Image (tube, rainbow, N blue to C red):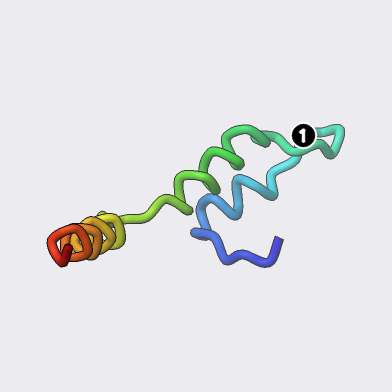
Amino acid sequence: MGMTLDPFWAGKGEMKTPLQKPRFPQLFQLAIAAMTLPHSNADPERCFSVLKKIQLDD
């Protein structure tokens, strides 16, 4: 995968059932998705600011 995860979630992703299948595959995928969400809204705010300036420059 090539990503560094929080050690807790990395451990959950490595857990296996007695049949050597991933124990929590959906929970692990959810954790990966949640950790990829931006933690701030600075980028969208910056985009809106630029668009506002462009609109006002007419």
- Point out residue 25 in the picture as x, y percentages from the top left corner: 67, 36
Residue 22 sits in which quadrant? top right
For this rendering, which residue is in front, 55 or 18?
A: 55
Q: Amino acid at mark 1?
A: Thr
Residue 12 sits in which quadrant? top right
Q: Residues within 10 Å of mark 1 (few under 14, many from 20)?
A: few
- Point out residue 32 in the picture as x, y percentages from the top left corner: 55, 48
Q: Is residue 37 above or below residue 23?
A: below
Residue at 52% x, 45% y is: 33
- Point out residue 16 in the picture as x, y percentages from the top left corner: 75, 40
- Element at label 1: loop
Residue at 61% x, 64% y is: 3
On screen, residue 44 versus residue 55, left or right, reads right
Q: Is residue 29 above or below residue 42?
A: above
- Can you name the residue that lies furthest to the left here? 56
- Can you name the residue that lies furthest to the front here? 58
On screen, residue 21 versus residue 8, left or right, reads right
**Quadrant where the C terminus lies?**
bottom left
What residue is pinned by disc 1? Answer: 17
On screen, residue 46 versus residue 10, left or right, reads left
For this rendering, which residue is in front, 33 or 47?
A: 47
Q: Is residue 15 above or below residue 2?
A: above
Residue 19 sits in which quadrant? top right
**Quadrant where the N terminus lies?**
bottom right
